[in-house]
Image (tube, rainbow, N blue to C red):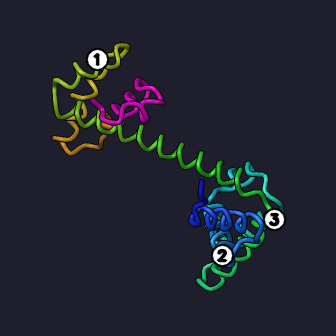
Amino acid sequence: MQKNPANDSEELSRESEVSSPPSKTRRKQEMHALQDIGEQLVQLDLKQLTELDLPDTLTDAILEARGMRKHGAIRRQMQFIGKLMRHVDARPIQEKLDLWSGLNLQHSARLHLLERWRERLLADEQALGEFAQKYPGSDLQHLRALMRNAQKEKLANKPPKSFRALFQELQRIIPEDSGRNDVTGE
């Protein structure tokens, strides 16, 4: 059996990747990735920052970056935060940031679902029947009253008290995990 020269060169390149230090380009990419994480950290509130349990120097640098207004100063501070991030394991931080953004997306999806149901209930009389089938424990009489009052308020140009109350009632009825499972609202 003959050796394939292409396979030999692939093996040599894999061995050299393992034994040689990362290229300058690769190091730059890693530094930019750490700066990106640092930028996300600057956007967090104080409670989330303390939950991450970051080193004091990194936390101080993040808090200092929040107060800066000039572009050049912010850029330098972000580079400094990226430098400090090299001494921290960024994987758990990134996982936590991803988790938080996922929760935000789930919360957003639920709010959109509630809004779609409210709009459908106000626009279509048959939507209440569909809603009752999907969520059997609902108080249909109360929902009908809120729908009727919201429509009257809109026609009379009154404050949307029942419109908001209908949304709150839908929040109470529709479970938390519905934003993920029922995105269509049908």
Image: magenta residue range:
164-186
Identify the residue under disc 1: 132
Across and down, in percent, residue 155 comes to 16, 41
Identify the residue under disc 3: 87
Quadrant that contains the C terminus: top left
What SS does tag 1 mark? helix
The residue lying at 59 percent from left, 58 percent from top is: 2
Across and down, in percent, residue 135 comes to 35, 18
The residue lying at 66 percent from left, 83 percent from top is: 73
Across and down, in percent, residue 174 comes to 41, 26
Q: Nearer the viewer, residue 98 or 46?
A: 98
Give the answer, above or below, for where 179 lies relative to 76: above
Identify the residue under disc 2: 28
> Would you say the magenta stretch is mainly helix, strand or loop?
helix
The residue lying at 53 percent from left, 45 percent from top is: 102
Amino acid marked by disc 2: Lys
Image quarter for residue 59?
A: bottom right
Closer mark to the observer between disc 1 and disc 3: 3
Amino acid marked by disc 3: His
Q: Nearer the viewer, residue 11 or 2?
A: 2
Spatial CA distance of label 2 from label 3 is: 16 Å
First along the sequence among labels 1 and 3 = 3
What SS does tag 2 mark? helix
Q: Is residue 177 left or right of residue 84?
A: left
Q: Does the magenta segment cover residue 177?
A: yes
Q: How many marks?
A: 3
